[in-house]
Amino acid sequence: MTIGSAFATKAEQLQATEETRSASLKEYSVNVAKAAQASSNNDGKAFEKLSAKAVAALTEAASVRLSISDITVGVEGGSEQPLVARVVGQVAAMKARVDKELQDVDIPTFAPVDAKQAIALNPQPLAWFTAITIETLPLVLMGLLLALWREEEPDQQAEDKDDKNVVDIDSRRSPNSFRTPAE
């Protein structure tokens, strides 16, 4: 095996490895986007499943190592120098492109919580407004009742005493004894 053919073979292997890595990163991006959508739809099971797929794809992409350290060649000289230089240049260009695209990734974690904790962590404003309204409504109505309560005016009481059909409750008698104004 010549140096040129060894480098050409290694370049093909690196190209295939880089394509596998790119496919894994694309799969990761798609799964993270779907997981974000599932999270916004409050679909915990789908979010957990898609997050696991995204982590698996990212782990697969991170396990790819691009290196030329394992090239084994026989010793042949001379005529291969331009080919070797071209293949080494291709490998260096591919490594530079991969290093440029390499980026840190933050992976959201999913921790299931029970309903009480979920409500405590993310209270809904309408529910709070409704609860406060229900709690304060009796107080407001009592204040309104006290503000609008009026005693009968004396001239109204005089008109009532002249009316024969009005029953007067005598405060000195027991509450169940009534008398009419004629008594």
Image (cartoon, helix red, strand yellow):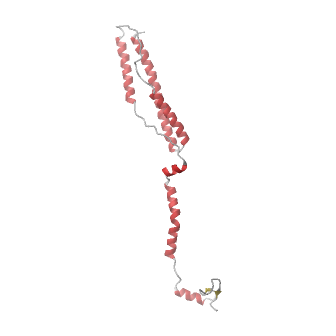
Identify the residue at image location x=40%, y=27%: 98
Location of residue 78 by image quarter: top left
The one nearer the camera, 115 or 140, is 115
In the image, taking residue 181 as reference, residue 130 lies left or right, namely left
Location of residue 170 by image quarter: bottom right
Q: How many marks?
A: 0
Q: Is residue 7 above or below residue 123?
A: above
Identify the residue at image location x=54%, y=42%: 44
| Quarter of the image with the C terminus in it | bottom right
Residue 173 in view, yes or no: yes
Identify the residue at image location x=39%, y=30%: 101
In the image, taking residue 172 as reference, residue 150 lies left or right, namely left
Q: Is residue 50 above or below residue 10?
A: below
| Quarter of the image with the N terminus in it | top left
Q: Position of residue 29 (x, y in %)?
A: 47, 34
Q: Residue furthest bottom?
A: 183
Q: Position of residue 132 (x, y in %)?
A: 50, 61
In the image, taking residue 168 as reference, residue 23 lies left or right, namely left
Q: Position of residue 18 (x, y in %)?
A: 44, 24
Location of residue 76 by image quarter: top left
Q: Position of residue 135 (x, y in %)?
A: 52, 63
The one nearer the camera, 32 or 44, is 44
